[in-house]
Amino acid sequence: MDRLTAMRVFTEVATSGSFSATADKLEMSRAMVTRYVAELEQWLNARLLQRTTRSVTLTDAGEHCLRRSQQMLALMQDVEEETASTEGALRGQLRLTCSMSFGYAQMAAAIADFLALHPQLKIDLDVSEGSLNLVEKRIDLAIRISGEPDPLLISRPLARCDSVLVASPAYLAQCGTPEVPAELARHRCLSYTNFGKSVWQLTRNGETAKVSVTSHFSANEATTLLQAALAGGGIALQPTYLANPLLHSGQLHAVLPAWRLPVMTIHALYPSRRHLSPAVRALLDFLVERFAQLPW
């Protein structure tokens, strides 16, 4: 059997801890996943995994094999990409991660357009709100929105991220429209679990207002709060890349539009400048150019 494929299958099983999840991700049968792992164990004459009905864990030999397999797979991907770049075509697979809201509103279309330019590439997008170990998860590029990116990663700014307060016309008709920031305190507010849940900061002409808001509904993800706002659930703090289409259509109205919320930056993050593949470089340049064009 193909030993490189066996290493790839073993690495996926070791990372996910599941034969079934590996079969789904690699689009092969569970029996084939089991066979690849067994063949690799037979070739190395060592048990690599301890399997029970509830878990899959690495043996000592499996730990060593995982490190070497990851190195071999990374080397082969570099060879494929470097060979492809000399022939003028990008090949291989990129692994990306971004938030659900940004994936929904922007990255899905951006990836589709990029793949149309490079049809021999494949992209696997991990939609995740939490931080990920890019090396451990073998992520080539992470798109994150923050005021300060992770200092341990290389960052390339893609665009600024503005935010706006929004509510449905029905909510505002029933509960009234705030005229000054202090009036937010008596409204039903929809907040992020891990960001500005209790205090919203707004500025106007050098004046700053910090308002303690009552969060009747909080979530860790923007599209969930957006849907709650559309349903008349209250006033939500939303990124403009997600809310703008609904503001233009009139499904949502801006609240306190003269006041500004803190601006963050959309960053592309990657582990190291060394050995940055041609495909990652091409995608970075594509995203920088795409988001430099306003409105985006």
Image (cartoon, rainbow, N blue to C red):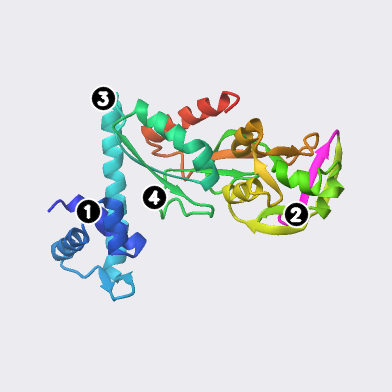
Residue carrying label 1: 28
Considering the numbered disc 2 on the image, is that residue within a helix, a strand or a loop? Answer: loop
Q: Is residue 241 left or right of residue 134?
A: right
Disc sitting over residue 142 in the figure: none
Disc sitting over residue 87 in the figure: 3
Considering the numbered disc 3 on the image, is that residue within a helix, a strand or a loop? Answer: loop
Q: Amino acid at mark 1?
A: Met
Q: Position of residue 211 (x, y in %)?
A: 82, 51
Residue carrying label 2: 188
Q: CA distance from mark 3 to mark 2?
A: 58 Å
Which residue is at the front of the view, 52 or 192? 192
Q: Which region is colored magenta?
A: 197-205
Q: CA distance from mark 4 to mark 3?
A: 26 Å
Q: Position of residue 26 (x, y in %)?
A: 27, 51
Residue carrying label 4: 138
Comparing labels 4 and 2, the label whose residue is closer to the camera:
2
Q: Amino acid at mark 2?
A: Arg
As for residue 274 lying within the magenta part, the answer is no
How many residues crowd around disc 3 within 10 Å: few (fewer than 14), some, or many (20 or more)? few
Quarter of the rendering containing residue 46:
bottom left
Considering the numbered disc 4 on the image, is that residue within a helix, a strand or a loop? Answer: loop
Q: Is residue 271 left or right of residue 258?
A: left
Considering the numbered disc 1 on the image, is that residue within a helix, a strand or a loop? Answer: loop
Name the residue located 36 percent from the left edge and 28 percent from the top edge. Answer: 116
